[in-house]
Image (cartoon, helix red, strand yellow):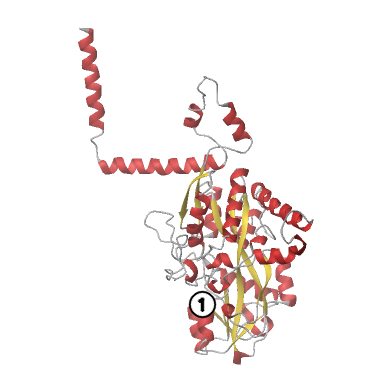
Amino acid sequence: MKLRTGMLIAALGLSSTLLVGCGDDSDEQKKQADENQQTSQESSTSQYAGGTSDSDEAESTSDNGQSGGEDNQQAAAGGGEPVNLIFGTGGTGGSYYPIGGALKSVFEESDLVDGVQVVSTGASVQNINNITDGLNQVAIVMSDVAYDAVKGQNQFEGQAADIQAIAGLYPNVVQVVATADSDIQSIADLKGKRVGVGKVGSGVEQSAAKVLESAGLSYDDLAQVSHTGYADSVTEMSNGNLDAAFFTSGVPNSSITGLMQSTDVTFVPVSGDVASTLLEKYPYYENYEIPAGAPERYDLGDAVNTVAIRNIMIVPSSMRDDVAEDLAKRFHDYLESGNVSVGALKQFDPATMDKNLVVPVHPGAKAFYETLSSSESTATDGGDVTNAGDDSDLSEETTSMPANEQAATTEADGAEAEPAKQTSAETPEDNAQPTEGSDTSGGDNAQDKEPQF
């Protein structure tokens, strides 16, 4: 009797379980998707910080019944389970997104990285907020926004972000172009002229206002202030309705190149006292020279001195040292591999990845850069390195950018960029699919658009 009763109870329990699985599939799938997304974010947050989940702890007991002390010692020393990374980029038409797509496969080759999910975002400000909230573990941002974040000022007032840098990237160059008949030769000459300063709130307008300020000018000193984007600025200059315009992007900028085909222009330098004042007040600016006689960079007759704002790759300060070190190493090796096809990544020297950054370098990444310095010292000291006595030439050759003619023309983050054009230079890295159904083929020729910070 007891046996029959037990069997009946078991049968009823099994029936109940089967009935539960017969509910609304859409509700159940939605619930499961939400749980999976939450689990993915929680897993990434705990793993990159060196944490372990409850299930990891439950399985940490060894075969002989002892706790996994060896694993715990490894985690305490900076090691641990492979991590999942969510990589925040920018708009799908900008440069940040294809860079994320290229680095996805590079980072996933690491034994310390289980997977990388590349996501399109609103760029710099959102990327920093996402890292602070634990939603992203890697991101690309502009130095001016990152500077404000670590200082807890402007849009980050009272909410300083605990972020650190993995590497410095390519610069967004401030390019001021005037029509040849406007007689504008300096920033001071913009007084009383009609000037395009970029869309309201864009990175271009922010740079324009700061450059004018450093020259002792304001919008009130201009005859006309035009809040036009690149395409409209070029059209107005071609039609004789604007005397000059600001562009902040990689070099060359395709809009400027197009303008030069129909209109004689002058590149206005941002140099001398104007540059000195700008760099002193805003340390995220750096000097930049657009070279002369470079067909891939406007083929100018004379070099133009100006300023630039660098992009940087950031991570939370809590990222494990071993993960940060390996990310820096793999990124550096990728840049040196000769397989880089995203034009923006060809616009800077890998030897400068840890130089002149406005955000502290992560200790793990710093450890990798110190190994590079040690290698250079060994070569200089006459170690077993070929041509050690000619170290400067060797360093210059091995760190030069091989294909600047394919430089990106995307302005800043490209947070609201137009769809990217296809380019014959695409490689599997450019076409890496960071998320299901997404497209990372933006590559070198993404449209020049002003991002909104």
Left or right for 417, reference 362: left
Report which quarter residue 141 is drawn in. bottom right
- The quadrant of the image that shows the C terminus is bottom right
Residue corresponding to mark 1? 254
**Residue type for callout 1:** Ser
Q: Residue at x 48, y 79 (%)?
A: 231
**Residue 318 visible:** no
Report which quarter residue 185 is drawn in. bottom right
The total of numbered circles placed on residues is 1
Position in image of residue 80 (x %, y %): 56, 37
Q: Classify 132 as above or below 58.
A: below
Position in image of residue 389 (x %, y %): 77, 62
Left or right for 286, reference 427: right
- The quadrant of the image that shows the N terminus is top left
Q: Quick one: which residue is furthest to the top in this view?
A: 1
Report which quarter residue 277 is drawn in. bottom right
Left or right for 111, reference 7: right
Q: Nearer the viewer, residue 51 or 143?
A: 51
Q: How packed is label 1: few (under 14 Cα within 10 Å), some, or many (20 or more)?
A: many
Position in image of residue 182 (x %, y %): 61, 90
Q: Quick one: which residue is furthest to the bottom in this view?
A: 181
Q: Nearer the viewer, residue 220 or 136?
A: 136
Q: Classify 290 as above or below 103.
A: below
Position in image of residue 86 (x %, y %): 49, 50
